[in-house]
Amino acid sequence: MTSSTSKYTDFESLRDRAVALRREGLSRRQIRDRIHIDNNDLLNRLLEGEPPPDWTRRPNAKDALRARARELRLEGRTYDQIQLELGCSKSSISLWVRDLPKPERGRSRAEASEIARKGWEATLRVREEERQRTKEAAARAVGSLSDRELFLVGVALYWAEGTKDKPYERRERVTFVNSDPGMIRTFLAWLDLIGVDRARHTYHLMIHENADVPAAERYWADVTGAAPERFGKTTLKRHAPKTTRKNVADAYRGCLAVRVRGSAELYRRIEGAWCGIVGAASTLDQSNRA
């Protein structure tokens, strides 16, 4: 009994010290170092119920939106009206203001529907702006590529999108197929890097029969900078009359196959380089990775 009482007294004494330090504005780390507690579970128990000081809170980009949403709700705005002004989702608004009184309804169903539509458009606009900011920041972070980096990128691109040799069918030739012009341009830059003469390239378009074939042929000629005679006969993909296709917009231009003549040796180099990448990744020291 005495031992149990002593442990309880020690805990309460530690808790009093921890709470006092917390109320002075110290962080968990500072409290831990001050009272020499290395056990996180014990520290959690000592600080149970004590909120962290404001300076230790991580900044939240939505704090300002949340505060503004609550202001608008107190003014009597509906979720749709708040969404229209702030561009955030109604699910977020609901979480932020659900403890506040609901405004009285004062509009028709048609008016409410129009406000909801405009609110959703505002949300989509904000999402698109966020998407573009993220993409632009990521693009800037890449910067310039060294020859080695471009070489490794090209090997990985080919192994993802190029044709491969099979044990049951020897196909040691380089053929890269893609519908993304950026992928095609990067692959061509890679071929230039490793010294493959463009005179060895041939191009072959594959596209659905009901697409604008001449426009697609002109488009890929511009992307590759190749003369028309470098292009083989276009392959038309035929389908049943009732087939429903989604890739029918003006941006659809089919797939381009880039082939390199006399490329068995090049294919073997690509396969070997890919094996080297896999081996290096497999033996990477995980403790040194950020």
Image (spheres, rainbow, N blue to C red):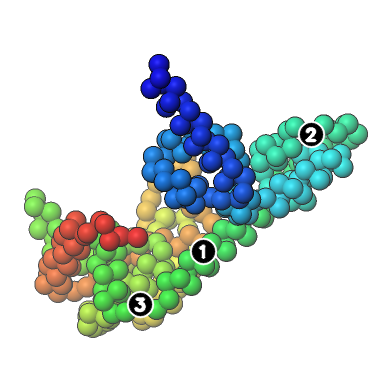
Q: Farthest residue in the right direction?
A: 106
User: Observer-nearest residue: 138 or 290?
Assistant: 290
Question: How far from the left and from the top, in percent, is residue 35?
Answer: 46, 45
Find residue 161 and report its image quarter.
bottom left
N-terminal of the two: label 2 or label 1?
2
At 54% across and 41% down in the image, what residue appears? 17
- Identified by mark 3, the residue type is Leu
Q: Secondary structure at mark 2?
A: loop
The mark found on residue 135 in the picture is 1
The mark found on residue 100 in the picture is 2
Q: Is residue 13 visible?
A: yes
Q: Do labels 3 and 2 touch, CB within 8 Å?
A: no
Q: Farthest residue in the front direction?
A: 2
Which residue was labeled with disc 3? 145
N-terminal of the two: label 3 or label 2?
2
Left or right, 270 with reference to 55:
left
